[in-house]
Image: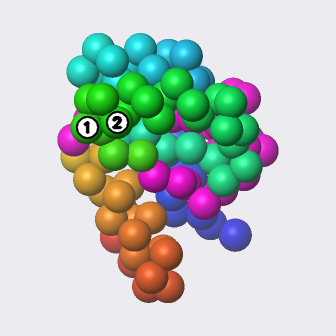
Amino acid sequence: MNDRVLSFLGLCRRAKKLVIGAEVTEESVSGGKSLLVLYAADASQNSLKRVRRAAQENNVPMLCANRSKDALSRSLGRLCAVLSVEDKGFADRLCEMIDSEQRGEFDDKI
């Protein structure tokens, strides 16, 4: 199965616009670089606690990627449950993709 969100996250990573990990995501959010925080559906509340607080303080949206930590990790080649997107175009497109996925729509554009 071709997962468009995971493929797009791989593109973000290759463009060096993706930060992987809770601590560095918190730093990205606090530093004003992050435009979107994504987290795995099974991410621990302990991992999300500080990131969520930083995102709220800095008005950075947080979205569940609707993927497991394992799926995100396999896709990105690195263990991860929390991600920060540091590019407006990538962040906007990921929001659209996840939103349309949650509504049950299929979008063939990347």
| Colouring convention used in this rendered image of the protein | rainbow
How many residues crowd around disc 2 within 10 Å: few (fewer than 14), some, or many (20 or more)? Answer: few
Q: Is residue 32 left or right of residue 5?
A: left
Rendered position, 66 above or below 89: below
- State the residue position of label 2: 56
Looking at the picture, how far across and down is residue 75, in whole percent? 66, 44
Secondary structure found at label 2? helix
Q: Is residue 57 left or right of residue 22?
A: left
Which of 61 and 67 lies nearest the eye of the viewer? 61
Which residue is at 49% across, 28% downward?
A: 51
Q: Residues within 10 Å of mark 1 (few under 14, many from 20)?
A: some
Query: Which disc, if any, is residue 80?
Result: none
Q: CA distance from mark 2 to mark 1?
A: 5 Å
* 32 displayed left or right of 100: left
Note whether residue 58 is visible. yes
Q: Is residue 28 above or below residue 66?
A: above
Pick the quarter of the image with the N terminus: bottom right
Residue 33: x, y in percent?
A: 27, 22
Residue 13 in sight here: no
What amino acid type is highlighted by mark number 1? Asn
The quarter of the picture where residue 73 lies is top right
Q: Is residue 64 magenta?
A: yes
Q: Which residue reaches farthest right? A: 70
User: Would you say residue 16 sits in the magenta stretch?
Assistant: no
Quarter of image, res 80: top right
Residues rendered magenta in the picture: 63-88
Q: Residue at x 41, y 14 (%)?
A: 27
Q: In this image, 6 relative to 34: left or right?
A: right
Residue pointed to by mark 1: 59
Q: Which residue is pictured at 72% across the width and 38% down the height?
A: 44
Where does residue 104 sit, x and y in percent of width and height?
A: 49, 85
